Image (cartoon, rainbow, N blue to C red):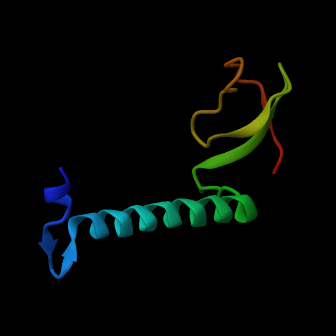
């Protein structure tokens, strides 16, 4: 196994390439988590924010499929 990891590709060992790729993936995940924490999720033009008049659930539903995600009621009120 160690022989495979010590093989050289483009002047770097396979182990070095795996470590760098892993660091890039972890860095991307961390940046994405930070961006979501500060920026939140972006609303699309296909969704609207609503409140269910039946169970009180508040959230985003499809523009053309207006049903509560909790109770499947169609009595929703737009909240903005």
Asked if 58 appears above or below 41 in the picture, the reply is above
How many marks are shown on the rendered structure?
A: 0
Q: Give the residue at x 63% y 58%.
A: 33
- Image height check: is 61 above or below 73? below
Tell me the residue at 60%/56% (across/down). Answer: 45
Across and down, in percent, residue 4 comes to 14, 57
Asked whether 1 or 51 is in front, the reply is 1
Q: State the residue at coordinates (61%, 43%).
A: 63
Which corner quadrant of the image does residue 3 belong to? bottom left
* The one of 50 and 70 positioned closer to us in this rendering: 70
Residue extending farthest to the front is: 2
| Relative to 35, 56 lies left or right | right
The image shows residue 57, relative to residue 1, as above or below, that is: above
Q: Residue at x 71, y 22 (%)?
A: 70
Q: Position of residue 32 (x, y in %)?
A: 58, 62
**Which of the 4 quarters of the picture holds residue 2?**
bottom left
Q: Position of residue 67 (x, y in %)?
A: 66, 27
Q: Is residue 6 left or right of residue 72?
A: left
Q: Is residue 22 left or right of residue 59?
A: left
Left or right, residue 47 beside residue 10: right
**Splitting the image into 4 quarters, where does residue 77 fall?**
top right
Q: Nearer the viewer, residue 69 or 18?
A: 18
């Amino acid at each position: 196994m160690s022989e495979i990891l010590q093989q050289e590709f483009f002047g770097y060992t396979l182990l070095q390439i795996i470590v760098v790729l892993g660091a890039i993936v972890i860095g991307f995940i961390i940046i994405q988590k930070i961006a979501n924490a500060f920026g939140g999720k972006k609303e699309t033009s296909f969704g609207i924010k609503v409140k269910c008049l039946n169970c009180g659930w508040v959230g985003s539903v499809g523009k053309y499929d207006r049903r509560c995600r909790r109770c499947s009621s169609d009595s929703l009120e737009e909240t903005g």
